[in-house]
Amino acid sequence: MANVNWRTINIDALDPDSPANFDLTSLAPSVAPVSTADVQSLASQIRQLLRGGDNEGALQGALENPPYGADDKGKDIHLATVIEILQSIRQSDMSPILSRIYSAPGGTEALDVLMKYIYKGMAQTSATGTARNVTPQPTGFSQIHARGGGEGGGQAMSVLLSWHEKLVEIAGPGSIVRVMTDRRTV
């Protein structure tokens, strides 16, 4: 009888239903590549709507065409455009605008995209805010300065938190779950 070490046999390779035999690339949705120039031209069109006073149209235009296939620079340009739109809308206009977008065809998807931008904006403002305000102490602990940064990140965070609150009121907590499980990033 042959001397076989049963512990070294890879049984997943023998099972056709095993995750080892499953193509993981099929889980990620395919996205069309988008150039940075296309993102910049879209951003200029959206800013033109914003300058014309059409805040809702600018927001819908930004949410209908997220550059999923763009590089990091293109995604950052679009994020800056969306945050600029969100900061230009008054707090009393948030709920009516979100309600109109939600009731429109494709409104759930648009609000999910907005939630992605809110989370990315929160991550960006918190990362830049804490990186420069950490002071090492002789005791070995670091002291984080909360005030006196002068960068204005707190105001942007306040706007994003206000939008997050209104968005969860309109779209519900399911939007958070859909955003956290979606593999397409903005």
Image (cartoon, rainbow, N blue to C red):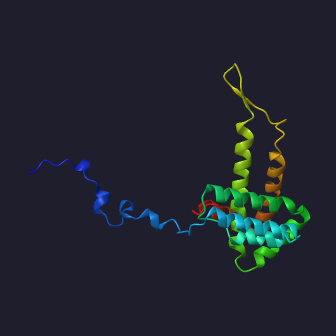
Whether residue 101 is situated above or below residue 164 in the rendered picture = below
Number of labels in the image equals: 0
Residue located 81% across and 51% down the image: 156
- The residue most toward the bottom is 105
Q: In the rendered view, does 55 fall on the left or right side of 125?
A: right
Can residue 165 be seen by looking at this rendering?
Answer: no
Residue 9 x %, y %: 25, 52
Question: Residue 52: x, y in percent?
Answer: 88, 70
| Residue at the image position 83 percent from the left and 45 percent from the top | 152
* Location of residue 139 with respect to 73 vertically, above or below: above
- Residue 32 % position (x, y): 56, 70
Q: Residue at x 70, y 63 (%)?
A: 40
Residue at far top of view: 138
Q: What x and y, as percent, mark residue 126?
A: 73, 45
- The reply to whether residue 45 is visible in this rendering is yes
> Which quadrant holds residue 180?
bottom right
Location of residue 94 (image quadrant)? bottom right
Q: Residue furthest left?
A: 1
Q: Quadrant of the C terminus?
A: bottom right
Q: Quadrant of residue 169?
A: bottom right
Q: Residue at x 78, y 64 (%)?
A: 167
Vertical order, 10 against 28 (above or below): above
Tell me if 95 is positioned left or right of 66 in this view.
Answer: right
Report the front residue among 117 and 65: 65
* Rendered position, 123 above or below 70: above
Comparing 58 with 17, the one in front is: 58
